[in-house]
Image (tube, rainbow, N blue to C red):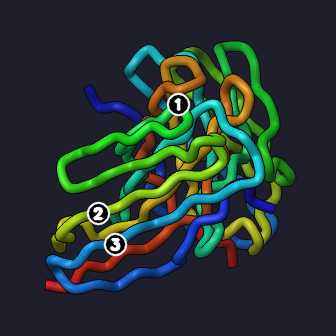
Amino acid sequence: NAGVTQTPKFQVLKTGQSMTLQCAQDMNHNSMYWYRQDPGMGLRLIYYSASEGTTDKGEVPNGYNVSRLNKREFSLRLESAAPSQTSVYFCASRLAGGRDEQFFGPGTRLTVL
Amino acid sequence: TQLLEQSPQFLSIQEGENLTVYCNSSSVFSSLQWYRQEPGEGPVLLVTVVTGGEVKKLKRLTFQFGDARKDSSLHITAAQPGDTGLYLCAGAVGDYKLSFGAGTTVTVRA
């Protein structure tokens, strides 16, 4: 089992460029999440998908879009990158919700110049 | 504004000492989780607490959920260098979301 995988691991963009972060899980989980992590801020939820076919905004959705491609895959798109989006991005999944454990991917370190 | 406030933000201690990390909120949570994150990796779940006043032990780690389910603490006895990492608390919000605290960076010196 690979668990939660993310690509790429590192990315450098120029302001205004676009890119898509990919995430996949092989645990047959229903819920998937995208977070960003900045120093001193903990993890902040960008978007989540409670189940296949649904997506909802989290705390900091502005500048991002998501697609739940199927049960396994959940992608995050930056349409026009800004320096404020420099961060480490984590994808996570859990079986459903409530008390279930969230399993995290290894993260993508994104720098926007 | 984060729902959960963690303190202290940084903690550096000598091997063998004890430490406590606090996680406080004005909100009530149906459950609360503690995660540990090592550099370059994603967080990993340590424990979930669900009942007010609950105490759970995981080897040298003791987790407590406040009676009112608004706060929690993590106590490490006789800390070891392997305990070094970022400790995050997270409270359940609604059916699917977690709200994370800003984290406590713990460094245990050999």
| Amino acid type for the residue under numbered disc 2 | Ile
Real-space CA distance between mark 3 and mark 2, rounded to the nearest whole angstrom: 5 Å
Vertical placement of residue B42 versus B96, above or below: below
Name which of mark 1 and mark 3 comes first in the sequence.
3
Q: Are marks 3 and 2 in contact (CB under 8 Å)?
A: yes
Q: Secondary structure at mark 2?
A: strand
Q: Quadrant of residue B96?
A: top right
Name which of mark 1 and mark 2 comes first in the sequence.
1
What is the quadrant of the C terminus of chain A in the image?
bottom right
Is any part of residue A87 visible from this angle? no
Is any part of residue A99 visible from this angle? yes
Residue at screen point 47% across, 57% down = B73
Which residue is denoted by mark 2 in the rendering?
B76
Residue at screen point 65% across, 14% down = A52
Vertical placement of residue A26 versus B7, above or below: above
Which residue is denoted by mark 1 in the rendering?
B51
Q: Is residue A32 left or right of residue B77?
A: right
Q: Position of residue B29 (x, y in %)?
A: 67, 37
Q: Nearer the viewer, residue B84 or B68?
A: B68
Q: Is residue A55 left or right of residue B14?
A: right
Q: Position of residue A22 (x, y in %)?
A: 55, 40
| Amino acid type for the residue under numbered disc 1 | Thr
Residue at screen point 77% across, 63% down = A81
Chain where mark 3 sits: B
Residue B19 - label? 3
Real-space CA distance between mark 1 and mark 2, rounded to the nearest whole angstrom: 21 Å
Q: Nearer the viewer, residue A100 or B66?
A: B66
| Amino acid type for the residue under numbered disc 3 | Leu
Vertical placement of residue A31 versus B29, above or below: above
Which is more foreground, mark 1 or mark 2?
A: 1
